[in-house]
Image: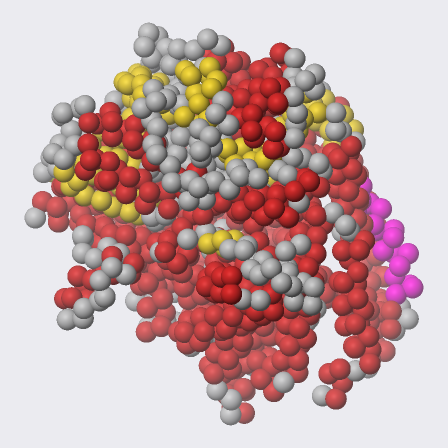
Amino acid sequence: MEFVVISLLNGITYGLLLFMLSSGLTLIFSMMGILNFAHASFYMLGAYFAYQISTWVGFWPGLLVAPLLVGAVGAAVERYGLRRAHRFGHVAELLFTFGLAFLVEEIVHLIWGKVAVDYRIPLELDGTLFTLFDTSFPIYKGFMMLVSVGMLVALYMLLTRTRIGLIIQAALTKPDMVEALGHNVPRIFMLVFGGGTALAGLAGVIGGNAFVTEPGMAAAVGSIVFVVVVVGGLGSLTGAFVASLLIGCIQTFSVAMTLSITDVFALIGVALPEGSQVARLTITQLAPVLPYVLMVAILIFRPRGLMGARES
Amino acid sequence: MKSSFVKRLTLAASLMLIGGSAAAQVKIAYIDPLSGPFANVGDGGLKGFKEAAEILVNQKGGIMGQKLEFVGFDNKGSPQESQIQLKAAIDQGFRFITQGNGSGAAHSLIDAVNKWNARNPDKTVLFFNYAAVDPTLTNEKCSFWHFRFDANTDMKMEAITSFMENDKKIKKVFIIGQDYAHGHQVARAAKEMLARKRKDIKIVGEDLHPIGRVKDFAPYVAKIKASGADTVITGNWGNDLSLLVKAAKDAGLKTRFFTYYAGGLGTPQAMGASGENQVLQLTEWHMNVPTKSTEKFALDFNKKYPGLYFYYLRVNTMTEMVAKAMNTAKSTDPKAVALALEDMRFPAENGEVWMRKSDHQLMQPLFISVFSKQDGKTVKHDSEGTGYGWKTLASISQRDSQLPTSCIMERP
Amino acid sequence: MSSIFSRGRLLLWGACLVVAIALPLVFKSGFMLSLLCQIGIMVVFALSYNMLLGQTGLLSFGHAVYYGLGAFITMHTLNLIGKDGSPLVVALLPLVGGLAGMLAGVVLGYVTTKKAGTTFAMISLGIGELVAACALMFPGFFGGEGGVSGNRVIAKQAFLGFTWGPQVEMYGLIVAWAFLATVAMFALTQTPLGRMANAVRDNPERAEFVGYDTQRVRYLMLILSGLFAGIAGGLTALNYEIVTAETLNAHTSGVVLLMTFVGGIGFFYGPIIGAILISVMQIVIGGMTHAWLLYFGLFFLFMVLMAPGGIASVITVQHKLWQAGLLGRMLPHYLATALPVLVLLAGLVGLIEMGYALLAGEGVGAGDTATKVMGMQLQLNAPEPWAAALATAALGLLLTRWIGGRTRVAWNAALAALHGDKA
């Protein structure tokens, strides 16, 4: 019981972190149809900007300024790079972000070096929030969850309750019609891209010190965010939210399981040959690759994702 | 675009010519990642070698009057690229190479060197390995043309378990590691050796996770906690180690962590305060092991290269031993140098070391230390500017870290 | 269809083969030979990738899976043969790799090719991640960190004088396979299947309408592409005599994508150019400067934004201009543009190199105070070199924009004339 509760808590925490990382990507993906491979790079930039700002004026100003800076960088990238690549089609667009991810990592190496930087959790948030069955729950994790849920609510309100949100919604299903109605779609695109990257930046500000701020951090989360977006379904913020929680919990609980593949097959009445390497694998070992299994399965059986509005 | 490319190509060609013509030195090719994600590790090693060659060899008369020089070759961490760089080094007249980061590249190089030497007996090449710790390199795959200057995984585990043997407080051990060769070897060695030395210790759990993919170690920590372990053994390095330690601190897990790689190359910085008194490491040396001259060497090094921290004592040991072997053999022929290195006993800064002839594995003293607050006394120096440094708990002599080898060496 | 092997084409192919065979006579060093071998392998790999991306319109992020599996199976077969085989068997081993790649294509392709477009891209990404993760989990087959190694010289007696021991013999083998594979892949583009693949890429609905099963076409193309990727993998296994898990990870998939795209996906010979260029850049420029990854990234972005058709498209346009007798008109403009571009590049390279030296030292971590750029010794703590480099770059930029503008006018006129001729 104790273990289940703690695992559930861990799963939800991790899921909310994933949502924070992928909400911006969902926005960009659904609106512009761009698989932004550089999304995680903006997450990394957020962490590094926040680190830099925190060395000058502290954490709290960084929390506000760093995402805005990242958003500005994102908007500039859209305006001067993506927009041009867009003319050459989706593949060129995608490859542009692919190359951008590469470049951002190298520039981060150059400016901040190749080892982790000392980006710390602010003192106000360092400590234990509550203790559950002898396992402590840090304040900072609570803070992360709060921000993540806040992001969901704010985005939801923005998309459903504001004018720009309605235009974005409309552009999702009928882009040509929106254009025909006289909306400046390129400018909306720039705003959406800037906004999406700013969200990634915010995730970086908060994730950077909870984990480790180092040049490999973008590559480490690069593909998992795609899994969330694809599983959740294109264009569905709620889908991304549900997928995040689902993946968070799947991963946490599978770590907790000590069953081996042999045991699993035994449950369904199939006996595997003893001693083979496959048979000895445990669910725990497989835990971190399960999201990819889930993604492939979803794409095969339900290509629009859990709650997607349309296919690809 | 095209003209600039031609320009670069000619530049490359001319650089190669220059590289080939400067031959009045003894040169060692350093084949390790100098760009990409592991460049910091490779770069730190290269700077260490250059500094060691300058201060420990060249300022003391060099090698038969010639200067010793280390030249970097960027293998980008890839086994295939290592072979291309080996060819480049051979073309430029290098007869000695050194490598350390990644056993994959080491395996690739040991194979390539063996084949090259068999096919070109007049132009043999000798391989000094300063950090690749896969035990097979000095066991099943041992080679006359390969010398290892770092203790291998099994020797390190032997030292760790010897320490655990005497600590009766340890009752329950949890093993966690990265799911690849190194992690598997650590887990296997830990189980075997503990079963031999302390039958009463229970292994309460064993987990492998994919390397570099786990963002949040909280579920693993929850599992360790649920298992009731008092001690964790891990071969993790880099972020997989820092994140594990951080997650343990967040959840209030109070076990001790026995590690291989907590001491350098950014990990202390990333762990920060969360590792205090909980993280132990096994190394051949750390800043708070008293030495004759390495303390000064290290401080000078750190000052000269801001952002880098002197970490590999074995780099110095290796440089000095190689120079000594060349001076004794009065030759820079790889075979003569190899013969002179065999069975060499050398007073290194961490104590006497011995290059075993049967498998070309260096036997050296090892130290177990714990991450503690800098106090100016036993913890005189901190690690990577964190305010925490390493406090020696135990030292294992060269003799006690020896393990038998299964090497059957083909000698030329 | 009769012109598949027209005289001009035969001449061109023959010339390429002669050059490939003659290269080792010119570049005798072991390093150049290794580089040439790497290029040969990459040419096959990139061409196989373009069967998906260029010909069928399938963007894959996991092509290394087929390449890597081919390499592993080849290596295991080589080790199985042991001492009993003959060099002839070794020479045929890449075919085993090819069959392995093909089999992987049959199994995985069944799942991945059900959909095209983004869905395909994402499935290939997922499967690539899965296979790469498995490679580390099963050290029995994939050899763990050390990989699987073998010895391609398996017998004392030679086959027609070949033992494949010396690198130059291996190069010969690679050239032979690469040439065969290239011819086969080219021939495939001319078959009905190859044509249908193009139709499926351009207009799947109409292809369906005409009565072709698009899913089936995609599936077949993926299987065949797996075959050739597997052959390339088999060649790597023989060439390096070691295969590690990284041959099938995302990095390798990324590199082949870069090569193919930079070379040009719209032309059969594009990937060949890309494979040569990127291999040379990686190895030669990588040996010259630690900033090579940055140059690499910048170059790639430049290509995406300025020449999305790849280098092959640039060449093809020049060729058309030449045929129309318009190239002579453009040449002075090219030369005039080259000068300011060179100035701009010199300035940029200077800035980047100085930046690297200052911020990263010789690699990382240490601020050097002096560095050598293009033969000049520069003091980094003084403002002059920075100002000079900045001024050079700015001057280059201004001149490029000015002269480039005029070149563009001339260019548009030439293009108009070209298309006018056609009409």
Image quadrant in which the C terminus of chain C is located? bottom right
For the point 59% across and 35% down, the residue is B126
Q: How many marks?
A: 0
Percent position (x, y) of residue A57? 43, 24
Q: In this view, does C80 lie above or below B202?
A: below
Q: What stretch is highlighted in magenta?
A: C327-344
Is residue C193 rendered to the left or right of residue A289? right
Q: A152 or B276: which is nearer to us? A: B276
Percent position (x, y) of residue B337? 59, 28
Percent position (x, y) of residue C76? 46, 62
Is residue A277 rendered to the left or right of residue C153? left
Q: Is residue C151 above or below residue B359?
A: below
Q: Quarter of the image holding residue B260?
A: top left
Percent position (x, y) of residue A310? 39, 71
For the point 89% across and 59% down, the residue is C331
Residue C337 is covered by the magenta coloring: yes
Residue B200 is covered by the magenta coloring: no
For the point 70% across and 48% down, the residue is C30
For the point 62% across and 19% down, the residue is B327
Q: Is residue B319 at least partly visible in the picture?
A: no
Which colour assignment does the render follow? secondary structure
Q: Quarter of the image holding residue B14?
A: top right
Q: B53 or B63: which is nearer to us? A: B63
**Residue found at the far bottom of this picture:** C211
